[in-house]
C-alpha cells in the first residue's frame, strides 16, 4: 500500500483519456487522494465507461447530478477545480 496526501495529475487531452485515467487510478494500491486537474468532464460518460470496464451495471451515486459516486472502495467527486478520487470512508 502506498500512502499519499494528494497526488495531482495533469489535465488529460480529452474525455476518453480522462476516463482511462480514472480507471487506472481506481486500480492503484494507494491510500489518500488523487486529483485530476481540469473541468468540463462529463460524469455520466465516465459512469458509463466505468460500468462497462468494471462489468458493474449500477454504480452508487451520492448526488442527483451524478457528480459524486463510489466505486471500488473509492469516492469520485467532480468539482470545478478537477476530479478527486479518495478512499471511501
Image: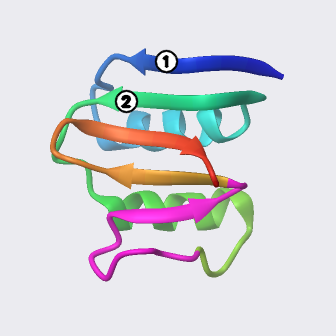
Q: Are marks 1 and 2 in contact (CB under 8 Å)?
A: no
Instruction: Give percent across and percent down for residue 13.
Output: 27, 26
User: For residue 32, what is the image quadrant?
Assistant: top right
Residues 21 and 28: in front is 28
Q: Which mark is residue 36?
A: 2
Inspect the magenta stretch and tell me whether residue 66 lies in it. yes
- Quadrant location of the C terminus? bottom right
Task: Please report the bounds of the magenta region as a residue range.
Answer: 60-73
SS at badge 2 = strand
Instruction: Give percent across and percent down for residue 69.
Output: 49, 65
Outermost residue toward the front? Answer: 89
Q: Earlier in the sequence, mark 1 or mark 2?
A: 1
Residue 56 relative to residue 40: left or right: right
- Prevailing SS of the magenta stretch: loop
Residue 69 relative to residue 51: left or right: left
Q: Which residue is mark 1?
A: 7
Instruction: Give percent across and percent down for residue 19.
Output: 46, 44
Instruction: Give percent across and percent down for residue 51.
Output: 61, 67
User: For residue 1, what is the image quadrant?
Assistant: top right
Mark toward the viewer: 1 or 2: 1
Amino acid at each position: 500500500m502506498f500512502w499519499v496526501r494528494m497526488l495531482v495529475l495533469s489535465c488529460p487531452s480529452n474525455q476518453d483519456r480522462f476516463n482511462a485515467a480514472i480507471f487506472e487510478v481506481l486500480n492503484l494500491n494507494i491510500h489518500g487522494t488523487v486529483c485530476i486537474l481540469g473541468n468540463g468532464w462529463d460524469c455520466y460518460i465516465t459512469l458509463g465507461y466505468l460500468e462497462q470496464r468494471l462489468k458493474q451495471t449500477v454504480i452508487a451515486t451520492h448526488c442527483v447530478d451524478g457528480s459524486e459516486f463510489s466505486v471500488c472502495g473509492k469516492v469520485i467527486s467532480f468539482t470545478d477545480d478537477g476530479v478527486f478520487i479518495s478512499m471511501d470512508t
